[in-house]
Image (cartoon, rainbow, N blue to C red):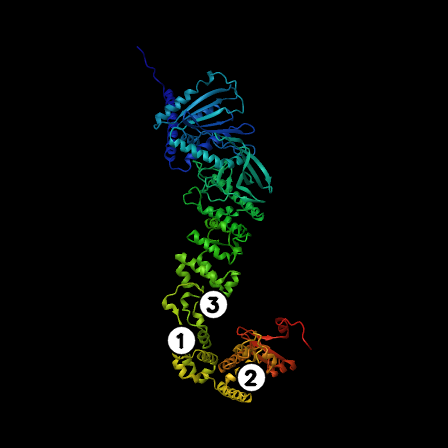
Amino acid sequence: MYLCKIMSYKERFNASEGRALSQIVATKILRDLTELRSKVQNSPTAPRRWVWELIQNAKDVHHEGGVKIQIEFGTANANPYVKFSHNGKPFTADNIRFLIEQISTKDRTKDEEGKRKSTGKFGTGFLSTHLLSEIVTIEAVAKEPDLDYRKFVLKLDRTGYEPNEITDAVQIAKRSVEDLDTRPPYLDYVEGEFNTVFNYPLQDEINIKVATEGAADVENCLPYALVFVPEIESVETLPDNRLYKSKGVVKKFTDTIQVVTVSISGQPSFHAVRLTKGYTDILMPIKKEGESIGIAEIASSVPRLFCDFPLIGTEKFPFPVIINNPHFNPTDPRDGVFLTNAQRPQIEENKAIVRDAVELYFELLEYASENGWKNLHLLAQLHSLPSTMDWVDGAWFKKDVLDPIRNQLLYTPIVYTADNELASILVEGNNNTWFPAASKKEIRELIWNSYHSWAPERLPQHSDIELWNNISWSECGRLTVTKLAQFVSFAQTLESLSWELGDTDGIKWLNDLYKLIALEEKEYDAIINKLAIFPNQNGDLRLKADLYKDAGNIGDEFKDILSLLGNDIRSVLTDERIEVEFSAERTMDETTVVKEINSEVNEKSNNREVAKSYMPAFKKLLLWFSDNTSLADKLFPVILKQKHLLYDDADIMANITKSNRLDQLMKKYDINDIDGLEDLLEKRKSGNGDLLPVTQEILASMGIQSATEWAEAIKDKNLQELFKHDSIPTTDMFLFVQSMITQAKASIIAFLDAHDDYDVSDYEETAPTILAGILKLGQPVTVVVRPAYNGEVIIYYGSEQDVLDFDDRAELWVDTGSEVKKITLGHILKTGQIRKFPI
């Protein structure tokens, strides 16, 4: 008969403690594995962590001079695998136990320089390597200071889905290394060889996907990590035989700004500018562009925050450069750092690191701008904080990071303009650079093309349109179609706009603008209805709603007549070159204008006092009647019946006098009719073919107002040599000349009256074109007036010549139609190119 031994309470407590610890270990491993398994399919970060956990662990056991790492993506007997090897220090007993039980040996103490000793080892992060394979075989060497080297092979099985399955697997792993003391010493151990190997068989598509993403991460992120972690001597990937190795600092711009390089397979393949303050680094890739340096883009798959190694998941942290600090306090899945609003030492430490990074960024920005580095827009890639980034306090980020950086960017020259200069976004708070902004790329292109004719120095380079469209924020000048149209309206006149556009045809430019406006449907109505961007026929920019389309059959004579009647029809008619659609109701033709002329003339001719102010219009209409007899009867029947109302009484008397003088002249020369006079003049024709026809403008420039005066003038041999003898002035021409001289005289008197130096209150006409009784600065002066609507003046009358020759206080004034001006001797010498003359 056997008696069972009864366990004491102490023995029972000890046994219970062992079971409890095993249960805790299994529960933790299973909990973390379950979370990783659930994320592996859809998480953008989980499949990428494994390679960095293995590299971090290797770095933490480096020998003096650094650790070498080899990562092999291979296939054995058609079975893919990943093999991770390093030449670091052997395992201790604690390392082995913690690896089996998945207990972190993370050492957050600091070395003599104040840097934390290790990044982390065999904790939750190492479990992520089981996404490669849930069964991992480790081939390694164990060594305690007072014990011999021992080789061991450890199999970690995490395939279980129940706590007891994990517990059994942990116990099996422990038992596999319990006999280390009885194994023979490993006498062939050589420090520096690849003595530690992790073998991961890839058993399904998920394992292969995880391996592929990890391999891509090595290619994208490893150069950055090698810059930050000098403890890693090299990393080799197989079978492509790519050897990554940091070459350290290769150039110094300043004490703070340095260029670092990482070679790949012996070639300097990765270059970056590095700035350091304490343990905080910022890093930005660069490349050589001709004789200058260009900023290079950070790949979207590269995290913006590093704790020596990339914190997978911080790729969208809105910062233009990489920030690294080994003292960052990361979140548990290492996908961010705590920057919340809680008052905790770890959080304040993280915020201080980011603020240091902002200062370093300012230094880099200033240096890069002053030295004309290319692609400076990459230093402006800073967006608002994503709402999903719950480990960052948005208010703090805006105040301490986003706003200070953007304010610095606004006033630092970082925009390469279309004329290849470097410009800032703002100057003294005003927009200095404009960035095309629209709903579609094609519209942004057209906006750029349109404004380029205007101000290329205020546009980004054509190749950067889309870059700045993605980067620019509210304080940046967004050049929309509406803003472009506003610029046009500010010009007020077509002349001013054309001056802004330089050599570009203003009308063609406007027609292109109208087509552009039509493309931006959301802005179309507001622009068309609220902005004055359509030129009328006077060249003024007006609202479309205030204008009519010219049907094209009105004629300049009618427009001139209406203008002289005080109804400037050109002010409401669009420039005929403008390509804009108008409805039939907004189109004006000859019929409408004829009605306006009939109405204006009937109203203004009935009152003789009122009529005097509109004689130039009446005379021009009479001339048109003379040239268009049959059409006049059709369009203006009522006015023709009262044609006498259009004549000025003084003009009528003058015409009678002139007619009598013409009759006397014809009798004197025995001429029976006008044809005879024409024949006489023909005989005097020089015949050289270069003679001028007699026009009403030439008559006006000579001051000749009647046929008698013309007949007397043509006796002058000098004039005979100028004019064709078959060109005979008509009575209507003299009427018009009289109106032109009257108009010029009135314009010049009005101009002098407004001039502070002149007093015309007592002027008198001593001849039709000579004014006396005018005071200039209190002294009498004689003024000769003359219309110069054809751009020239002919001094014929002897009285005018005598005044200008013998009166030392005589002045010649002309009205060109657009301005009133005094003609000086210097002007005559210069414009006539007179170098010598007789005395």
x then y, percent, for residue 49? 44, 34
Instruction: Say left or right for 704 vs 81.
Output: right
Residue type for callout 3: Asp
The answer for how far apart the CA atoms under marks 3 and 1 are is 24 Å
Q: Is residue 501 visible?
A: yes
Q: Which mark is residue 731?
A: none
Residue 607 occupies which quadrant of the picture?
bottom left
Secondary structure under badge 2? helix
**Front-most of 8 and 109?**
109
Task: Answer whether labels 3 and 2 touch (C-beta < 8 Å).
Answer: no
**Above or below 459: residue 607:** below
Residue type for callout 2: Ala
**Above or below 311: residue 790:** below
User: How crowded is the residue under tag 3: few (<14 C-alpha within 10 Å), some, or many (20+)?
Assistant: many
Quadrant assignment for the C terminus: bottom right
- Earlier in the chain: of badge 3 and badge 2, it is 3
- Earlier in the chain: of badge 1 and badge 2, it is 1
Q: Which mark is residue 711?
A: 2
User: How crowded is the residue under tag 2: few (<14 C-alpha within 10 Å), some, or many (20+)?
Assistant: some
**Front-most of 591 and 477?**
591
Secondary structure under badge 1? helix
* Residue corresponding to mark 3: 540
Q: Which mark is residue 594?
A: 1
Quadrant assignment for the N terminus: top left
The answer for how far apart the CA atoms under marks 1 and 2 are is 37 Å
Secondary structure under badge 3? loop
Instruction: Say left or right for 271 vs 170.
Output: right
Task: Answer whether labels 3 and 1 touch (C-beta < 8 Å).
Answer: no
The answer for how far apart the CA atoms under marks 3 and 2 are is 45 Å
